Amino acid sequence: MKQFFSSRAVRRFTRNRLALVGLFFVAAVGLTALLADVIAPYNPLAMDFDALLSPPSATHPMGTDVLGRDLLSRVLYGSRYALLIGMGVVVLQMVLGGILGLVAGFAGGVVDGLIMRAVDIVWSIPGLVLALALAGALGGGIGVMIIAIAVTGWGQFTRLLRGQVLSLRELDYVTAAYALGASRTRILFRHVLPNTLGPVVVYTTLEMPAAILSSAALSFLGVGAQPPIPEWGALIADGRGLISFAWWVSTFPGLAIMITALGFNFVGDGLRDVLDPRFERRI
Amino acid sequence: MKKGIVLLVLMGLLGVVLGATAQTQRPMVTAFQEEPDFLDPHRTTRFHSLVVLSYVVEPLLDMDPSFQPVPLLARSFEWSEDKLTLVFHLKQGVLFHTGQEMTSRDVKASYERYFRLSPLENYLGPKYNGITEIQTPDPYTVIFKFATPKPLALYHIADAHASIMPADWLATMPDEEVGVKGLVGTGPYRFDRWIRGDRIVMKRFAAYNHAPDYISNPGPAHAEELVMRIIPEAATRLAEILAGNIDYTFDVPLMGYQQLVANPNLQVYMAPTYSVQYLVCNMKRELFNDRRIRLAIAHAINKEEVVKGAWFGIAFPLYGLVGPGTTGYWKGVEEIAYAYDPEKSVAYLEQAGWTAVDRDGVRMKDGKRLELTLISFSNVDQWRRAAEVVQAQLAKVGIKVNLALAEVGATYDRARAADYDLGIFRNTWWMGEPYLTFLTHSVNIGSSNFGQWKNETIDTLLDLSSNALDDVLRRDAFVVAQAIVVESAVWIPLAVNVNVVAARRDVGGLDELFSHPWQPPLMRALVLYKR
Amino acid sequence: MLVPTLIGVTAIVFSLMHVSGDPIRLLFGPNVSEEKVLEKRAELGLDKPIHVQYWNWLTRVVQGDLGLSIHVQDRVATLILARIGPTLELTILALILTVVIAIPIGIISAMRPYTIVDNVSRFVALFWVSMPYFWLGIMLMMVFGLRLRLLPISGRGGPLWTVDGLRSALLPVLTLGLPPIALFTRLTRSAMLEVINEEYIRTARSKGVHEVIVVVRHALRNALIPVVTLLGLRLPWLFGGAVITETVFAWPGMGRLLVNAVMERDYPVVQGIVLVIALLTVLANLVVDFAYTLIDPRIRYG
């Protein structure tokens, strides 16, 4: 916690221009998601059969899609689903993977072996394929998509937290705490969690855009969000065939997803410099 | 290590600069969206497999542009008085790709295999009291003995599923290797190689010379080599067509239609197909037993908008469940189809008691919202958008529709379990009678009757239209069946697909090809040429 | 340790595929009667309980028989053998491309942290990972294939050592190789930063050894270790990218075979491919675990 708010860390973060730009992007996307129904000029579901695929103009700044729906409004509303997917996936992964990692790290022995074997197993199935099979088994929709993406990626949190626990366990002060009879819970909250917070924050920030992009990949393969939800991945996938003449249909959602992903990646990259404890020790 | 990598990259760049190698004679290149599963006419159930294998193998008869069975491998045929014996006289000198002559022995072996293996065969075979015996008195005569008269037999015999392959070759091949390891027939092209996921290559069969009369070129085919590329992604296929790398294709991404038409290097042809899409109400849901609800839905659907929104306007509104490119089509359905009339729709709903409207604009009755689940396939853009359009149209009259689009397998499973309120489905068959039987006969509840509805009148009429010996009765029964299906409003026809062909300017023969209502593969193989 | 993992992987996938539903109706389409569907299901043994089916599959695999594809009726081993080459072509070239671009960028970033050079490098690295694979692929195809007509739009032109083969591989390789650059740049950069401040590097510097030589001879060698470690770990992930890339570029690889098989519920094919990938990955992971203990000797197992 301390290092997170220390003025030195903040200074280091703000020294990174790219991270600041990223923060701005992320804030913009967040605001858009909050205010979508206020700022969107049209109902994102309203079709206009007299204005199918109209190019960007004063009335439709981003043009309209194949069913005559205002693309700007759809992109604006889409930010909600992007953040929902990103956060949903990250939270699920963190809870599932994190707990398993802590258990593995503390328990050791057979339990550790079993959990790490499970990580290996999931890790050796290509994520997209696992997600595809899951989506097939559970049916489509955003909820299933979030679960499917989360299930493929929790392993890295497990590895991370287990690694942290293992390496901290070897540190002198933790060994000392053990020797002094401190309980596991106490060690967990006093020593392990504060020290893992940095890497976890970095991981989650970097996992958000990855999850959003995975949802786009699933949409491309036909198991994305249910229409007419204006999820960005689905918008890009829907418009991809039109790109050589109605470029706007997939380009604007594409830019939106890029800005969001770049934003999170910039911030995550910046945070990494500041919060990665190994890094901290060296400089 | 690093030097080696740099060297490799430089070599790569050099390769690019050198450019493509010059080629002497380019083969005829065509593109398919989907890869065939296997090319065994007797076992496949896939339409695109049937198209590809029809270049290689042929049935005894073919269908001419007026839907009449005409000789292909057979020279002529005659029925006995009691319609229980059908005699085929085979053409002499027709060669298989192996060089052997095609004889009655091959016909017998092929038909026996067809009856034994085909999952689609449900009319001609011994199990259905059709052909119980095949006699081969001499090499050029085949006699089919029927247990009961089968008035549609000739159509089924003209179906490519009943194609003829050499008896000797079949004897050497295990069933599951036919059409996988190889395929031998009498067709204008012989199967050369199949690079899975990439292409199927065929070579011209120089000895081919027995095309039916309606095709101007008796054979052999013009192009020496035929390359069928498999390009699943629509954007990619469109780019390849625009770049002129595809000589002709029937799998044209519809969204690119305007752009293709505007391209001076391409020619674009279109014609309606026999592939129809329809909306269906699941009659196992109590709600739909009230006919007024079905009528309300039928009147709320604007087919023109569906065509415009889902098919980029490159399709036709469909009025009956049998499409205009299908045998037995009755034009009268256009008169009796329910027209788009939202006011009527609202009136029906109110009569049925759905008078209240909640703040989302959804109709209510006894505290329940009028909310329906619609299933369809998620993997084809057109169906997904059709579902979206239908959803928006029904919302206008106060019916809330939740979409549950999933990949093909999941949707079929759900359809079979009758776990839906509405569905958008498609079916493809050029023979009207068996086709409407698939869709609406009660024996097909649980497979292709997605209305899940048993209507004895429809069953009787369809049985008559398939089995009555009197031609007029058969035809009339089929007309009435079409009318009743439309009036039931259980099935609400939406649109009929259009076959669009995009071809390079230097491809000839398209005018002749499009003189035939469904541009059969055999004709594609024989009339198209490169200038 | 290898065998339980492989059994776990295949058992999970097997059950998932079965939950997703029945392949026969999908194979036959709607117009085939229920009776024939049941017949076929019995013929393939799909009517047996799932654990029996899995056991049957397993015993056959142990005897070296991956079975017959339900959908395309060919031997699974034949299908995989035909498709694995093109996929390995793409993935290996893409890995090389990634490393060749990422490591220099990472080094430059590490040499001048927080300068404009660093920022530009980071931007270049992060740019590619911030858009969907298929989008990047289609964009590359539109620009280099359709507009500029420099490279083939899609398809595999032939073996890699031919000009056509190499030309047709370039765009898919870029699509597959550009996005992971960010990851490897990041890794190289931080690894370099760590190493640069080590005692022996400072010593080398103070002895007046030229900066470039310091970087290449001493720092880079050490920084490469985590990069190589990551290479092994990323194998299945790269394979996921190959699925998309192969679809966009109509590349006849194993990724597309796998996606189609999943969609067609062609269990034997899915199982076979997953087994092959899992085998490769598990082997890579063993190496990685070993390398992990080498890098940080304080970590031990148990």
Image (cartoon, coloured by chain):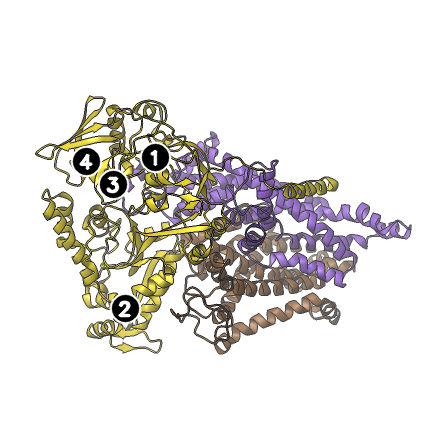
Chain colours: A brown, B yellow, C purple
Mark toward the viewer: 1 or 3: 3
Q: Earlier in the sequence, mark 2 or mark 1?
A: 1
Q: Quadrant of residue C113?
A: bottom right
Residue neighbourhood size for the residue with mark 4, other residues' Cα within 10 Å, grouped as few (<14), some (14–19), many (≥20): few
Secondary structure under tag 1 reads loop
Instruction: Name the residue beneath numbered marker 3.
Output: B63
Q: Earlier in the sequence, mark 3 or mark 2?
A: 3
Q: Earlier in the sequence, mark 1 or mark 4?
A: 1
Residue B77 image point, x, y percent: 18, 32
**What amino acid does circle 2 point to?**
Ala
Q: Earlier in the sequence, mark 3 or mark 4?
A: 3
Q: Chain of mark 2?
A: B
**Quadrant where the image shows the N terminus of chain A:** bottom right
Disc ID at residue B40: 1
- On the picture, is A204 further left or further right than C47? right
Work out how far the residue at label 1 is from the one at label 3, CA to CA, in angstroms.
21 Å
Mark toward the viewer: 3 or 4: 3
**Badges 1 and 3, same chain:** yes
Q: Earlier in the sequence, mark 1 or mark 3?
A: 1
Work out how far the residue at label 3 is from the one at label 4, CA to CA, in angstroms.
26 Å
Residue C37 image point, x, y percent: 29, 42
Q: Nearer the viewer, residue C211 or C201?
A: C211
Secondary structure under tag 2 reads helix
Q: Chain of mark 1?
A: B
Work out how far the residue at label 3 is from the one at label 2, CA to CA, in angstroms.
39 Å
Residue neighbourhood size for the residue with mark 2, other residues' Cα within 10 Å, grouped as few (<14), some (14–19), many (≥20): many
Instruction: Name the residue beneath numbered marker 4.
Output: B127
Instruction: Name the residue beneath numbered marker 2.
Output: B300
The correct choice, above or below, for A191 with respect to C244 in the image is below
Q: Nearer the viewer, residue C139 or A191?
A: C139
CB within 8 Å, label 3 to label 2: no
